[in-house]
Every structure is written in C-alpha cells, then in structure tokens.
C-alpha cells in the first residue's frame, strides 16, 4: 500500500505548471455570476416598465373617460348658497 502513493519530494513541480496556467486562463475568462444576475434583473425591470407604459398609452386611447360622481342635492344647494344664488323653492 505504501508503494501506491508517492511523497511530494518525488513529484516534479514543472509537470503541473502548464496545468496551473491553463486553469487560471480558463477560469479568468468566464462571466461573473453577480454580473449575470444583475443583467437579468435589470432586463426584467426594463421590460416591466416598458410594458406598463405601452399598456397605459393603449388604455388612454381606447378606454372612454371616467364618469364623474353625481353631486348630491345637498351639496348643490350649499354651492349655490355660497355663490349667492338662492335655491329654488326657498
């Protein structure tokens, strides 16, 4: 069993130098995972904002204007009194 494993003194360090250089070159060329997540989040946010804008403009063109709430008789009477016009029947 001792014959299967060699000590560190037996290993030539120059044999692994080319492998180390290869690993550092390939590892350095990959994309940063944080950058990928950031790009995805920003892309989704931009799509959401542009989509909302398009829907808003489409709704403004196609939907009829909102109806105003009817004014109660009591409020109409108050407004007329403020303007100095007497309400009919008084």
Image (cartoon, grey):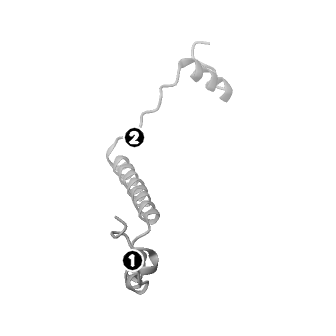
Looking at this view, is 16 or 45 the one in front?
Answer: 16
For mark 1, does the 10 Å Cα neighbourhood hold few (<14), some (14 to 19), or many (20 or more) residues? few
Looking at this view, is 66 or 10 the one in front?
Answer: 10
Q: Disc 2 marks which residue?
A: 65
Q: Quadrant of residue 87?
A: top right
Q: Is residue 68 above or below residue 22?
A: above
- For the N terminus, the image quarter is bottom left
- Residue 53 location in percent, x, y? 40, 54
Q: Quadrant of residue 44?
A: bottom left
**84 horizontally vs 35: left or right:** right
For mark 2, does the 10 Å Cα neighbourhood hold few (<14), some (14 to 19), or many (20 or more) residues? few
Taking the spot 39% from the left edge, 77% from the top edge, the residue there is: 23
Q: Is residue 90 above or below residue 45?
A: above
**41 horizontally vs 1: left or right:** right
- The answer to which of marks 1 and 2 sits earlier in the sequence is 1
Looking at this view, is 7 or 14 the one in front?
Answer: 7
Badges 1 and 2: C-beta atoms under 8 Å apart? no
| Residue 86 badge | none
Which residue extends farthest top? 89
- For the C terminus, the image quarter is top right
| Residue 23 badge | 1
What secondary structure is found at the residue carrying circle 1? Answer: helix
- Residue 66 location in percent, x, y? 41, 37
Taking the spot 40% from the left edge, 70% from the top edge, the residue there is: 31
Instruction: State the separation of the CA atoms marked 1 and 2.
Output: 65 Å
Taking the spot 31% from the left edge, 46% from the top edge, the residue there is: 62
- Residue 9 location in percent, x, y? 46, 79
């Amino acid at each position: 069993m001792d014959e299967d494993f060699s000590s560190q003194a037996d290993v030539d360090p120059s044999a692994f130098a080319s492998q180390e250089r290869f690993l550092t070159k390939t590892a350095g060329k990959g994309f940063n995972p944080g950058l990928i997540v950031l790009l995805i989040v920003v892309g989704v946010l931009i799509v959401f904002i542009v989509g909302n804008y398009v829907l808003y403009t489409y709704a403004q063109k196609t939907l009829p204007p909102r109806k105003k709430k009817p004014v109660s008789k009591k409020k109409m009477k108050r407004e007329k009194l403020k303007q100095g016009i007497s309400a009919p029947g008084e």
